Every structure is written in C-alpha cells, then in structure tokens.
Image: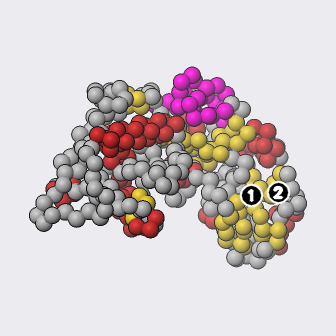
Amino acid sequence: ATRISCADHVIRTEIISRFLEVCFQFSCDKKLLLYLHTEVLVYNTAFPKMSLYPSLEDMTVGQMAKAQAQQQQQQRPAIAQGPYAPPPNSTTPGPSAPQLGGGGLYPSLANEYMGLELTKYVPPSAPPQAQQAVVRAPGTAVATPSNTGAVSGLANVGIRRAEIKQGIRQVVICKDAKGKCGVSLFSVNKGVFVCYVAGGSPAALGGLRFGDQILTINGEVMAGLSGDKASKVIKKATTNDITLAVRDRPFERTITLQKDSANRVGFTFNGGLTKNLVRDSSAARNGVLSEHYLCEVNGQNVIGLKDKAIADVFADSPKTVTITIMPQFVYDHMMKNMGSVLKRQMDHSIPDV
C-alpha cells in the first residue's frame, strides 16, 4: 500500500480505481484489510470530515487502525516538506505493517475480536519500487477510504445490493402479453408506494422493489392519489415505455451485521418480525429493533417466505449480512389487503449490482 496525494484537493478517479483494484484482490482476509486500511491513512487536518462505516465492528477496527497509523506517524523522523524527489537508483523504505498484538497501542486481537474469527496475516515483502513513500506536498488533499469497512470488506456485494440510495431514479417498464406490469400500488400518507412485485414480471426486471415510492407515472404526479387510481394510470398507459420516477424505499432502513463464530447475528424473528436480541451480539451493537419486519437480506426480498426459508438465506450468507427492515405498523398498513398466496408470489430474486 502506498500513500497517495492529489494536488488542488481533487481526488482523481483513476487513483481511487487503482486503490480499489488492489483491495479487491485481498478482500477475503480481515487482517490484510486492517493492514491496508492503516497503511493508506494520512490525515488531512485542513479538511476534517466525519467517517461513515457499514457496522459498529467496522468503525471500531477502523478507529484502531487510525490510532495505530497516527502513532506510527509520530514515531517516524520528521520529513522535510515539499515534493518528493528520490535520488537516482535509490529507494526509501516504506512504512511497516501495523503491529496488531503485543507492544502496540491496543491489546492483541488474538484469533477472535467481537465474536469474529480473525486469521493471522503476515504482509508479503514488496519489491523495492513498491516500497517508496510518497510525501504529501503542502496544501494537498489525500484520498482515504474513510467510508469502507475493515471487517465488512471493501465494496461488499450484500451492502451494495441492499443500499437505499438518496435521490430520484427513473425506471422504464412495459406490459406483458396479458397487459400487466406485475406491480401493485398502495397509498400511505398521500404518497403512492409499491406493495407487491411479481416474480419475473416487467416491474421486477425493471428494478422496482417493495417499499419504493412512485412519484410520477409518465409525467403525472402521484401525490394524493389512492393506490387504485395510481394503478389505473398504468392500465391506461401504452404497452411500452411506461416511465416512472421512483424514490428508494423511504420507510425502510438497512443495518449491516457481522456473524459470530457460531454463524449467528444475534436476533430472533417470528413470521418475519424481529422479536428478541442477544446481549452483546452484532444485532444489539448495531441497533436492530424489535417489532420490525424483515424485508430483505443482502438485498434479496424475503417477504412472504417462511421463517425456515429466511433462516436458510441467513445461513447461506457470508460473514457480513445486511438486513432491510420496516416498522411493523407501516408494514401492516401496506400489506393489510394482501393474502399469503400473493406474498409467496413476490419477486425473491437476487438483485444485480
């Protein structure tokens, strides 16, 4: 890992892309991610900002990495400011890997941390040309992976599938041979929301998901309309090019959890409704609440699935699991006219990233 600097406070796309390419190759090893996370941290005190992390475990490990990097910075001899110009045919040794145990700022992580199994990582020896340290020139910004997780892994697929994006997106759907789009709409608080998406339907293929808010249909504003009136707008539309303006699932929120050594995240559910939390579990640490319905697991819709099928989805998930939940009273209001058979016919496919 090499420290990267960019002039005029611009973090260039090619630098970020190169950094991610390096990290993706080693994303399976948590100790290596912690090492990379520490090595790329150079503090930009002129432009401080808050960091966001996928889970509390990521934040804790990330803060440990920052503290260790800061300690290493203080222990290194002062380096003259200015652009770096290495002498011909010479190299400058780069920073060593952070010491995760014994003699460091924090006690040893041993083989387990917060119920997560950690494997021993010994950083490989880099060729001389990769060990050169790049010194930050005065008044420059530095690219840092502040919103990535040393535990969850960079660009975690489950997190990306479950992401609730801010802003408005456009969705274009059509009608099938029966003249249907495969979507049901329901009105909540003067807004129109998706309460059902049929599996394999044009709506599912177009990317509509349970809980999405429909703002316009072919330019017609949906605010104040009932679900039936909004559905009639779709029925009257032409077969192709039905254009929707959609806001991602405003009543839902995502929580990223880490499985412990027993392959559990720390909460129970009944009928898809969260019930009890295990003390000191990842669910308790990251703010899972009871009396909330599970809508998605790693971006996959689980509404209408039996508890055993949902448990199987959890069991097949990797160590990092992202759940999407909705308060019970909102869920019950949206689903009060939907039978169990229709729920089972919902789209349960795994969304593309």
Considering only vertical position in the picture, is 202 above or below 71?
Answer: below
Horizontal relation, residue 246 to residue 23: left or right: right
> Is residue 276 in sight in this rendering?
yes
Check disc 2 and report its element: helix, strand or loop.
strand
Where residue 191 is drawn, which disc sits there? 2
Amino acid residing under circle 2: Gly
The residue at 42%/46% (across/down) is: 153
Task: Residue 314: give x, y in percent of width and height.
Answer: 52, 38
Snapshot colouring: secondary structure
The answer to whether residue 28 is visible is no
Q: Residue furthest top?
A: 279
Q: At which x and y percent is residue 323? A: 59, 42
Image height of 316 relative to 210, above or below: above
Tally of marks: 2
Is residue 19 found inside the magenta-colored segment of the image?
Answer: no
The residue that appears at 38% across and 57% down in the rendered structure is 20
Q: In the rendered view, does 158 fall on the left or right side of 154?
A: right
Judge whether 109 appears above or below 88 on screen: above
Q: Which mark is residue 213?
A: 1
Viewer-closest of 81 and 249:
81
> Is 122 in front, or is 306?
122
**In the rendered image, which quarter is residue 131 located in?**
bottom left
**Left or right relative to 260: residue 296:** right
